[in-house]
Amino acid sequence: MQFFVAQQLAVIIDGTEDVFWENAKMSPSENSKLGGTPLMLSCDLDTKEKIYQIEGTELYTKCT
């Protein structure tokens, strides 16, 4: 059986939802979504969303 957890983070501003993080976690281990590195993110909702390939999944984010 394959471990899989869909993740999505969003904010609602003036009734409009803005998704700024969408990814899938493929391992139950801590910090596995970015290769074991703890997340230290800065997110700007005014930036264009970027797509990254990480361990067989796609990460959609406005964070750096």
Image (tube, rainbow, N blue to C red):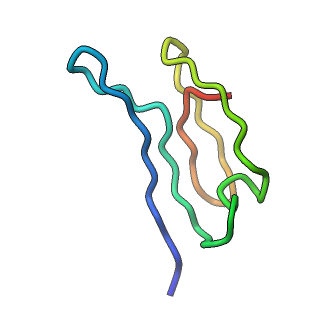
Is 48 placed left or right of 52 in the picture? left
Viewer-side residue, 28 vs 22:
28
Corner quadrant of residue 44: top right
Q: Quadrant of the C terminus?
A: top right
Is 49 on the left or on the right of 30, as rendered? left
Looking at the image, is 48 positioned above or below residue 33? above
Q: Position of residue 42 (x, y in %)?
A: 65, 26
Single out the residue that lies furthest toward the left. 15
Residue 23 in the image: state x and y as whole percent. Answer: 52, 50
| Image location of residue 5, percent across then percent down | 47, 64
What's the residue at 53%, 38% (across, down)? 60
Whether 53 is drawn above or below 61: the answer is: below
Residue 1 sits above or below residue 50 on the image: below
Left or right side of 11 for 35: right
Count numbered badges in the picture: 0
Q: Residue at x 72, y 37 (%)?
A: 40
Q: Residue 7, percent across and down?
A: 46, 52
Q: Residue at x 53, y 25 (%)?
A: 49
Residue at 65%, 56% in the rendered image: 33
Which residue of the protein is positioned furthest toward the bottom in this rendering? Answer: 1
